[in-house]
Amino acid sequence: MRPTATASALRRAKEIVRSRQASLFIHVAETRKEREQIAKPMASSPIGHLATLGTLDHHTVRIHCV
């Protein structure tokens, strides 16, 4: 199963909110299964994946982090 948001979509979303001086609200791996789906192919964890993409900062609100 592939992620619901591609890397390019996540980067673009962050660019948009930065340009508007707003915050990005994002659901991160709501279940253990989602965590495993992201962690295996992309990074050590879903948070690690977002960090690699450059989308994490103090204007990123992470919701449902498992």
Image (tube, helix red, strand yellow):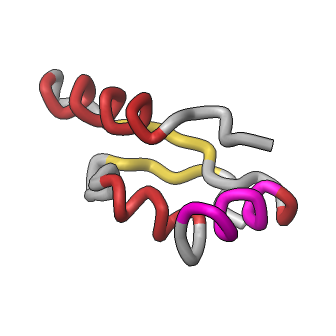
Q: Residue at x 51, y 65 (%)?
A: 47
Is 7 magenta? The answer is no
Residue 2: where, in percent of width, then height?
72, 41
Magenta stretch bounds: 34-42
Residue 3: where, in percent of width, then height?
67, 41
Left or right of 47: which side holds 20? left
Left or right of 33: which side holds 55? left
Q: Residue at x 66, y 33 (%)?
A: 4
Choose top left, top right, bottom left or bottom right for residue 14.
Answer: top left
Choose top left, top right, bottom left or bottom right for residue 31.
Answer: bottom right
Left or right of 19: which side holds 16? right
Q: Residue at x 37, y 49 (%)?
A: 60
Please, which residue is most extreme toward the front here?
41
Asked whether 64 or 2 is in front, the reply is: 2
Q: Residue at x 63, y 63 (%)?
A: 41
Residue 66: where, in percent of width, then height?
72, 66
Q: Main secondary structure of the magenta part?
A: helix
**On screen, 15 above or below 3?**
above
Is 36 magenta? The answer is yes
**On screen, 60 above or below 11?**
below
Q: How many marks?
A: 0
Asked whether 50 or 30 is in front, the reply is: 50
Name the quadrant of the N terminus. top right
Residue 7: where, in percent of width, then height?
44, 41
